[in-house]
Structure formats: structure tokens, C-alpha cells
Image: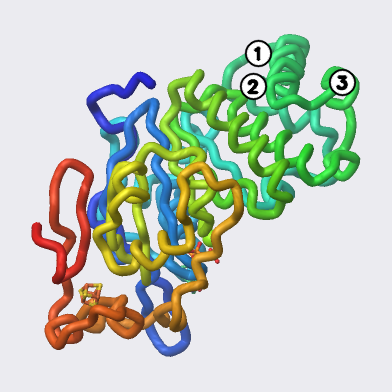
Amino acid sequence: MRQSAAPILSARALCVDFKLEQGWVRAVDSVSFDVRRGEVLGIVGESGSGKSQILMAAMGLTAANGRCSGSVTFEGEEVLNAAPERLDRIRGSSMSMIFQDPMTSLNPYMRVVDQLTEVLVAHQGKSRAEAIDIAVEMLDRVRIPDARRRISLYPHEFSGGMRQRVMIAMALLCRPALLFADEPTTALDVTVQAQILDLLNGLVRELNAAVVIVTHDLGVIARLCDRVIVLYGGRIMEEAPIEQLFGAPHHPYSQGLLAATPRLDDDTAHDLRTIPGTPRALAGQASGCPFAPRCERRMERCMAETPLLRGEHGRTAACHLVAG
Ligand SMILES: Nc1ncnc2c1ncn2[C@@H]1O[C@H](COP(=O)(O)OP(=O)(O)OP(=O)(O)O)[C@@H](O)[C@H]1O
Ligand code: SF4
Ligand SMILES: [Mg+2]
């Protein structure tokens, strides 16, 4: 792994709020992190914890009833709330995204060949013939058998796992410096999931890309990531290198998650909803620890005082029990 010193992506105090009938609610609450080239950062958290909205904000895809504040820089330049033309250019050339459902990014009415070559012709000035050669090579690399023939098919003519591979190929075609992946394998069965994660891992390491992957599955995190952020109710509860999180989680929420994941190389999916209680409702800025209603180690102080993220060198936790 070759990591460069300067982060390619930096989020600082990123907040995402949505306007509902009853007022504004906060989905992402003051989230800060860095990712460098050659590094895979995982964001793990249960449904509704704000994982996807972090990626959407960084990609400039927040829904119309949402607003973002704070800062997100890509290669040192601010991209949060940037002009659509600028974001289009970055998304086409240096940043790409893999969605949970391949049909979010594949057009069902266009042959795969046209979808794959479009970006190469439009953003990289390749001829159609050159673009087809590059696309076939990428389909080969994501192990689509008989790629030169199959590239002429429509998306629905591929199986679910194969379609996911097509989407990974599409996301990696322009050799992005930064890749976002949102639950890229959740819809697939465990064996195909493992194959695709290993494939993705190999390709991004080879490209020396930076990756931010969000998932509710700790098995995916264990397989792919160097570092992980544990998100709860839109806030970072803990950040740690993967071995440290799996070896000795500091935050009670992470400890609860990990209790269901005894081994780093365990392939089974781990559902985060094994922790008693229900996820935090999206509400305004209540004081106190967001995890307090579900925490077995809750103290009086936890209800009144919001714990700050403390620690250093990428090893932080937000809990009154954890010394800074
Ligand atoms: N357009 C919107 N308007 C209002 N609330 C929204 C909107 N989009 C997302 N939210 C809310 O923001 C919160 C965070 O959503 P997000 O999609 O980031 O969760 P997630 O962690 O990705 O969950 P999942 O694992 O289910 O994908 C959720 O409570 C969601 O309902
Ligand atoms: S601050 Fe208190 S309630 Fe929150 S995780 Fe720590 S011990 Fe539990
Ligand atoms: Mg999501």
C-alpha cells in the first residue's frame, strides 16, 4: 500500500440537515475525517445513521430538501456546495461511486458498451474503438466471461452479481483517484459478495485509489478496510485502524457491534441491529450522548453532557468513559 501524506479527501464538521414539515432535522452531525490515496476507509453504522448522506454530500448529490454545512475538500479544493458543472467534471474524471443497486447508475435502455464508453469518450477524448478496448479490458478484469461479446448486451441480460461487476468496472474505468462505495455488495449472496469485495480490493490497491465504503456489515469492513469510522445518529462514535477496532473497541456502541463479530476473517454477515434498543430518531440537537438510551454503561453525566471525540492519530472515541 502506498499512502501519500496529504489527504485526497477531507471532511470537517460536515453537517447535513433536511427540511421536513415539522422543521429541520440533522442527519449528519459534525463529521470530520481524512482519506489518503492507497487507503480504504469504512463507515459503519445501522440504518438511518447517516452513512449514505455523508457520501451524497461529498458528491454534491444531497436531495433538494437538504442543506450541507462545514467543509469537504477534494485535493485541497472545497467541493461542498460547489457549482454543478465543477462537480460534474470531478465526478466524470477523478471521483466515482458504486451504489447498492446497480440500476441506480446503469441505464436499462442502453447497451452496456455505450454506457461504459460514454465517459471515456466524453471526459478523456478517446475514440470509440479505443474506448471499447479499454472497457472490454476492464470487464475482463472484473471477471466477466466472454467480455467482448457480452459488452453489447443490455443490463437486464446480466445476472445480479454480474451487473454489480459491470458497475464496478464502470466506476473504475476512468481510473478514479477517489471511489465511494455505498453498500456495494449488500444485495448479493455471501459467496459472490466475497468475490466482488476481493476483486474491488485488488483493483483499488492497484490503482492506488482512495476509497470510502459505507456499510452496515462488519464482515465487509473486516475484508476491505484499513480504517473505520463507527457512526451513530449522524455522529462519529469511534474512529480506529481496523485491527484496533476489532481488537479493542473503546466505545460501548462499537463494543456492542463487535460482540457479534468474533473474528476478523469471519465471512458471515453481521447485522448491527443485534444491539438492544432502537436507532436514534432523527431529532434536533438534544444534549447528552446520542447512544445513552441504549447504553448499558450509561451514567448520570451521559444524559446531560455530550461527549466530545477525543484521542489522537486516527484513534478517537466520543464517550465519557474513554479518556482523551
Ligand atoms: N431527502 C430527505 N429528507 C428527509 N430526511 C432524509 C432525506 N434523505 C435522508 N434522510 C434521513 O437522513 C437520515 C440518514 O439517512 P442515510 O440514508 O444517510 O442513512 P444510512 O446510514 O445510509 O441508512 P441505510 O443503511 O438504511 O442506507 C435518515 O434518518 C433518513 O431518513
Ligand atoms: S458517554 Fe455514557 S451513554 Fe454514551 S457511550 Fe459513553 S458511557 Fe454510554
Ligand atoms: Mg444508506
Say above or below: 64 vs 41: below
Q: Residues within 10 Å of mark 2 (few under 14, many from 20)?
A: many
Residue occupying image coordinates x 36% and y 43%: 242
Residue at the spot of label 1: 126
Which residue corresponds to mark 2? 120
Secondary structure under the numbered disc 2 in the rendered image = helix
**Which residue was labeled with disc 3?**
146
Q: Quadrant of residue 257?
A: bottom left
What type is the residue that disc 3 sits on? Asp
Label 3 Cα crowd, 10 Å radius (few <14 / some 14-19 / many 20+):
few
Q: Is residue 138 left or right of residue 258?
A: right
Cβ of mark 2 under 8 A from ligand 3: no
Task: From the top left corner, tell me how far across and down residue 165 is, in percent.
Answer: 71, 35
Mark 3 vs 1, N-terminal side: 1
Give the farthest residue toward the front: 262
SS at mark 3 in the image: loop
Cα–Cα span, label 2 and label 1: 6 Å
Task: Using the image as rendered, state which of residue 37 and residue 104 is in the foreground.
Answer: 37
The answer to whether residue 34 of the structure is visible from this angle is yes
Q: Residue at x 67, y 35 (%)?
A: 195
> How is colour applied across the structure in the image?
rainbow
How far apart marks 3 and 2 lie (CA) works out to 21 Å
The vertical placement of 261 against 235, above or below, is above
Q: How many circles with numbers are drawn on the protein?
A: 3
Point out residue 180 in the picture as x, y percentages from the top left corner. Answer: 49, 42
Q: CA distance from mark 3 to mark 1?
A: 23 Å
Judging depth in this view, the residue of 179 and 264 nearest the camera is 264
Please report contact status of discs 3 and 2: CB closer than 8 Å, yes or no: no
**Left or right: where does residue 190 sit relative to residue 15?**
right
